[in-house]
């Protein structure tokens, strides 16, 4: 008989869930209920808390879409979140229970969005081994660009030129609460590609109010005019640009490059990594060369975001 048991998440288990995240080796504030619950109504959540001998030791954030379990549709990445007290054999056992649970619910597949290793507080890839053992297939791989801050690669000449141009035009970098102006800028920039921001301005403001030390907004200004902006998620050892946007005028004067240089050189210089996010489309099969070229100009180099599918 297994020492492990799975309990369906309910609101009354809020503090227990958060406690597991806070004590885990691969969790961060994205998995806290204060973050996940801002859009909970959009998903058929099937998340579980894993208990060992009656003690919570892991969580699995996920939702159901038809006959598929996804970890989790509302997050960039998610998976089994657990502490350093669990060993590889136990993770195998937990995955066996997850497979059994969701198979009995009538689901035919589990889509698993692995957490990139730079977001681990301590090595935590026992889940990938468990997926391999169960026959999961790699179905998508995005490439993100990350700067290792301890030995940054030098700026490219093109990035130096645009930053110098911005300085000559008197661009100033400020941190603040200008979410309305920033969201308008972001929506306009994405509309050129037929896309929309994932978050509404109200959602960004709500998340900022819940995580004021983790979610920070920076803008490149000419006087009072916002030319470019960066919304940064600060994970402690990693700073990640959740959204980057620039106006046409901002692009002309290199405003966004100037903002990024400020973040790298000043605000987040003490972090282990600075993450720019992915530059891939069509489930990783198309590389946006212009986008990744800009990130590489700041010293960003490739980090894989892997997606697995496990038949149930």
Image (cartoon, rainbow, N blue to C red):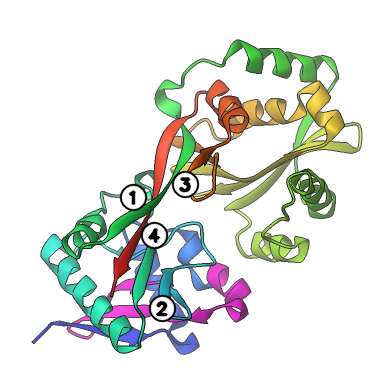
The outermost residue toward the left is 1
User: Can the viewer see residue 272?
Assistant: no
Q: Earlier in the sequence, mark 3 or mark 1?
A: 1
Judge left or right: residue 308 versus residue 292: left
Front tag of 3 and 2: 2
Which numbered disc, 2 or 1, marks the residue that appears first in the sequence? 2
Examine the structure image and report whether residue 167 is included in the region drawn in magenta: no
Q: Secondary structure at mark 1?
A: loop
Q: What's the CA distance linking mark 3 and mark 4?
A: 12 Å
Q: Which residue is mark 1?
A: 121
Q: Position of residue 163 (x, y in %)?
A: 71, 18
Badge 3 is on which residue?
236
Q: Which residue is mark 2?
A: 47
Name the mark nearer the viewer: 3 or 4: 4
**Residue 120 spot, x, y in % from top left:** 35, 50
Q: Residues within 10 Å of mark 3 (few under 14, many from 20)?
A: some
Q: Nearer the viewer, mark 4 or mark 2?
A: 2
């Amino acid at each position: 008989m297994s020492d492990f048991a799975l309990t369906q998440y309910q609101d009354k288990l809020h503090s227990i869930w958060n406690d597991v995240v806070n004590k885990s080796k691969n969790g961060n504030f994205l998995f806290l209920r204060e973050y996940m619950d801002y859009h909970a109504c959009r998903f058929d959540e099937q998340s579980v808390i894993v208990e060992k001998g009656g003690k919570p030791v892991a969580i699995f954030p996920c939702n159901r879409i038809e006959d598929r379990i996804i970890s989790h549709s509302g997050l960039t990445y998610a998976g089994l979140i657990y502490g350093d007290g669990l060993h590889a054999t136990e993770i195998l056992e937990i995955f066996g229970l997850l497979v059994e649970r969701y198979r009995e619910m009538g689901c035919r597949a589990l889509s698993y969005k692995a957490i990139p290793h730079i977001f681990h507080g301590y090595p935590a890839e026992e889940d990938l081994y468990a997926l391999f053992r169960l026959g999961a297939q790699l179905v998508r791989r995005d490439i993100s660009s990350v700067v290792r801050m301890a030995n940054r690669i030098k700026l490219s000449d093109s990035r130096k030129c645009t930053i110098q141009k911005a300085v000559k035009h008197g661009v100033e970098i400020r941190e603040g609460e200008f979410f309305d102006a920033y969201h308008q800028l972001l929506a306009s920039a994405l509309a050129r590609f037929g896309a929309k921001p994932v978050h509404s301005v109200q959602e960004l403001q709500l998340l900022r109010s819940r995580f004021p030390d983790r979610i920070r907004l920076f803008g490149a200004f000419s006087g009072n005019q916002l030319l470019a902006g960066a919304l940064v998620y600060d994970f402690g050892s990693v700073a990640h640009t959740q959204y980057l946007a620039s106006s046409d005028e901002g692009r002309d004067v290199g405003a966004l490059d100037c903002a990024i240089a400020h973040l790298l050189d000043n605000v987040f210089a003490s972090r282990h990594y600075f993450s720019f996010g992915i530059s891939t489309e069509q489930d990783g099969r198309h590389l946006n060369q212009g986008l990744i070229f800009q990130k590489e100009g700041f010293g960003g180099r490739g980090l894989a975001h892997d997606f697995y599918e496990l038949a149930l």
